[in-house]
Image: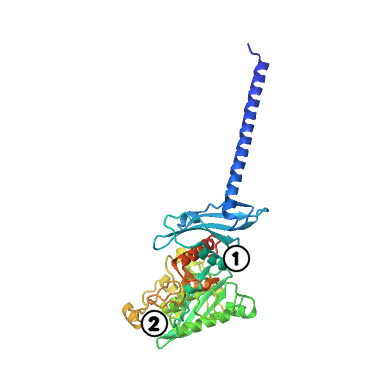
């Protein structure tokens, strides 16, 4: 019969054997994984080192990759100190003719420069481009800023946009609209227009601050307290307003998807808020809903939404209300409405002159609401050249003396697809 001491010894020996077995197994797995990782890194080095040098590479796992049909995979390159060196983006381009171009595109860590290109060349229906032609393109692109375009892809025809149009349906008077929330600097944008004989004759775009001790944005820009790239903000605002006097229609300012415009020289700031408020002022003019009624109704809405705030405390010397609604106040008090006239529930506005058909006739069929990126809606006039959906102002490197053949354009598109992916991934659109 086994004694208690013998049983304890047997249990201890069993535990030791199990522990040793587990240790041997873990060591084996570690060695195996190490060999697997070494083989994987050796493969990455063979594929990527000529595109983007790195001590090691890892694959990116992101929903942005999964949701992008043209991006097969993305890899990150690191140096010995674990610093990111850049990205290798696997692009699988399919042309309109169902031809394929499968490439690795190397881009620097800040997303600004092309570091290398390699064709995978495993396509079933390949785009036929010789190594010589591909090398010729690479010689002008690698090391240069992206996005890129062939010089032959960019047209240089000037499109006439200075012809003044009459919008139609505008009532004479002074009309006003302001943003309902402050921006990140505490400014509340506002636009005021004056209409005489059915034409816009005066435009003001400025912004007041929720802090009454802070100057208006135009004054702050002139004093140096508020700075932006290019000309000071006051100058850019004046230039944009003057352009609207010439064009009459905010859509003809050709605002792009990033909020900027190419057609107004000297204006580099974001004009999205201005264009939105210009459209609202025009709508108010058509409804004969003037500045005084707008401000009076806005005042009533503020009082209702804040349980009786003292209006004098949020009224500046010009009689404007520097009040910023919270998200919850907008949801509760405004619902889906976009301007004060609609939100106030005013029903007695004069809309007799806003018949859509008469407006369309007076404007030669130009759609006055909304516009595509750099295009006058309802018109064939393109106000900005584009390559692969990118405006010409965004192109950083032009490839010269290369024809815009399908093969060459496919290579260019692959680079720009990679650029656009990083533009979203690095949150450049925020």
Q: Nearer the viewer, residue 129 or 388?
A: 129
Cα gap from disc 1 to disc 2, whole angstroms: 49 Å
Q: Image height check: is 7 above or below 390? A: above
Q: Is residue 169 left or right of residue 107?
A: left
**Residue 177 seen anywhere in this rendered image of the structure:** yes
Q: Secondary structure at mark 1?
A: loop
Q: Secondary structure at mark 2?
A: loop
Give the image location of residue 354, x and y in percent. Answer: 35, 79
Q: Is residue 329 left or right of residue 346?
A: right
- Label 1 belongs to which residue? 143
Which label number is shown at residue 276?
none
What crowding class fits label 1: few (fewer than 14 Cα within 10 Å), some (14-19), or many (20 or more)?
some
In primary-sequence order, the first of circles 1 and 2 is 1
What crowding class fits label 2: few (fewer than 14 Cα within 10 Å), some (14-19), or many (20 or more)?
many
Give the image location of residue 219, x and y in percent. Answer: 60, 80
Q: Nearer the viewer, residue 126 or 107?
A: 126
């Amino acid at each position: 019969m086994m004694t208690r001491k013998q049983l304890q010894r047997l249990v201890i020996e069993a535990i030791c054997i199990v522990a040793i077995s587990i240790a041997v197994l873990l060591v084996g797995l570690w060695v195996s994984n190490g060999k697997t990782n070494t083989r994987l890194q050796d493969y990455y080095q063979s594929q990527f080192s000529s595109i983007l040098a790195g001590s090691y590479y890892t694959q990116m796992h992101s929903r942005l990759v999964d949701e992008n049909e043209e991006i097969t995979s993305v890899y990150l390159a690191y140096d010995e100190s674990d610093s990111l060196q850049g990205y290798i983006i696997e692009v699988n381009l399919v042309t309109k003719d169902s031809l394929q171009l499968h490439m690795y595109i190397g881009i620097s860590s800040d997303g600004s420069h092309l570091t290398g290109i390699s064709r995978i060349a495993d396509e079933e229906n390949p785009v036929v481009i010789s190594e010589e032609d591909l090398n010729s393109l690479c010689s002008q692109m690698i090391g240069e800023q992206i996005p890129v375009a062939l010089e032959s892809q960019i047209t240089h025809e000037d499109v006439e946009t200075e012809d003044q149009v009459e919008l139609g349906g505008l009532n004479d008077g002074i009309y006003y609209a302001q943003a309902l929330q402050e921006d990140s600097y505490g400014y509340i944008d506002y636009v005021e227009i004056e209409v005489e004989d059915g034409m816009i004759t005066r435009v003001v775009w400025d912004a007041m601050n929720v802090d009454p001790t802070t100057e208006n944005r135009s004054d702050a820009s002139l004093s140096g307290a508020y700075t932006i790239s290019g000309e000071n903000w006051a100058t850019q605002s004046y230039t944009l307003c003057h352009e609207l006097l010439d064009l009459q229609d905010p859509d003809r300012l050709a605002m792009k998807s990033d909020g900027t415009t190419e057609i107004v020289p000297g204006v580099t700031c974001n004009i999205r808020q201005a264009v939105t408020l210009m459209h609202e002022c025009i709508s108010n003019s058509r409804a004969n809903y003037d500045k005084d009624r707008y401000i009076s109704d806005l005042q009533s809405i503020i009082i209702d939404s804040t349980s009786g705030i003292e209006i004098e405390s949020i009224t500046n010397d010009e009689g404007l209300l520097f009040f910023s609604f919270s998200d919850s106040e907008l949801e509760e008090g405004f619902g889906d409405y976009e301007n004060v006239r609609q939100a106030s529930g005013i029903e007695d506005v004069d809309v007799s002159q806003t018949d859509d058909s008469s407006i369309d006739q007076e404007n030669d069929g130009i759609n006055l609401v909304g516009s595509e990126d750099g295009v006058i809606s309802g018109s064939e006039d393109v106000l900005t050249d584009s390559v692969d959906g990118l405006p010409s102002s965004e192109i950083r490197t032009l490839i010269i003396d290369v024809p815009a053949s399908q093969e060459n354009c496919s290579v260019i598109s692959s680079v720009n697809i990679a650029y656009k992916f990083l533009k979203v991934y690095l949150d450049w659109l925020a």
